[in-house]
Image (cartoon, rainbow, N blue to C red):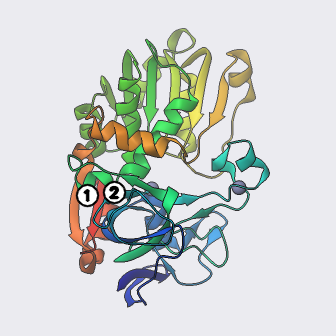
Amino acid sequence: MHALVIHGPRDVRVETMESPKAGPGQLLVRVAAGGVCGSDLHYFRNGGFGAVRLKNPMALGHECCGAVAAIGDGVEGFPVGTRVAVRPSLPCGKCVYCREGKYTHCMDMRYYGSAMRVPHIDGVFRQELVIERDQAYIVPDSVSDAEAAMTEPLAVALHAVRRAGSLFGKRVLVTGCGPIGVLIIMAARLAGAVHITATDVGAGPLTIAADVGADETIDVAENPQALSAHSVDKGDFDVLFEASGNPAALLSGIECVRPQGLAMQLGLGGQVDLALNSIVFKEIELRGAFRFHEEFGMAVDLMASRRIDVKPLISGIFPYQNWAEAFALAEDRSRAMKVLLTFA
Ligand SMILES: [Zn+2]
Ligand SMILES: [Zn+2]
């Protein structure tokens, strides 16, 4: 079977690997589709991000779905052919945080396609993948492979929205309209937000943000004063979701959050020169959101019930052999939101 393996910046190779076998409690999945994520692009462009660096070749990818091809001993309820979305996280279940149910913070987390651990955990951009039984979430036929492959980013968005508490009747600002920002817009609408403003630095992402339900979109590169207008009278939004990782977006976003409002940071980035007084005077709460756990199953359910439709995010679907074309499109934010690979 083939896998897409990264060796260093701009050095991705289609490699042949031995077909894996499902052990006890495991499933062999024939991967159908996989989504190219920002982190895959960081490895592709720079060989990593922040302190996380590629130290050995690694199969890319953590967003995928497929069909069960074989089952290991002791697994029930997943007949061969069952379509599943694959949760890329595998918390240990034993550490102090797992015992508290805070699986996202597992001390021994295994996450596909991540160089955080050494040796790295290989990713899902491959034709065959062995997973643990609890990483498999059954997908109904009404949800396509491309949609099911987007369960992971939707779960990230749902986790952030749940961490924000009730959004019912609230005014929401979303900064950064990549896939996560756009999925947050959808989830925030579903959660009862009464108004959503979305910002980005490009027309392409903002068009999709408007399509999926943002009430107002602002291109802050072209028209920064449109956002400043929301900072009068101490701010206009109850909740900020910062999904760009750009320090300027957090700083200007906080200016627009009402007293005792919430600033939820999801975008990963570097240092921010934060004016403490803006947090203190307005009693702003600054909160982080990272990955997900139980939200993965919720994401499948919300797609199955059509309460959330991720199809407007899909920019292109390419066979894995054409990965170079797929990555080139994914890198172009003016044209791409979510690019998918197929592994048939
Ligand atoms: Zn992802
Ligand atoms: Zn753990």
Label 2 with label 1: CB-CB less than 8 Å: yes
Dot 2 alpha-carbon crowd within 10 angstroms: few under 14, some 14 to 19, many 20 or more: many
Q: Residue at x 28, y 28 (%)?
A: 213
Which residue does the numbered mark 2 point to in the structure image? 149
In front here: 44 or 141? 141
x, y percentage for residue 8? 51, 82
Secondary structure at badge 1 equals helix
Q: Position of residue 83 (x, y in %)?
A: 30, 59
Residue sitting at x 59%, y 77%: 54
Residue at 48 percent across and 67 percent down: it is: 131
Placement of 105 over or under 112, stated as above or below: above
What residue is shown with label 1?
145
Percent of width and height locating residue 330:
32, 62
Q: Amino acid at mark 1?
A: Asp
Which quarter of the rendered image does ligand 1 occupy? Answer: bottom left
- Judge left or right: residue 34 versus residue 291: left
Q: Quadrant of residue 215?
A: top left
Location of residue 164 in the rendering, given as x and y in whole percent from the top left corner: 56, 27
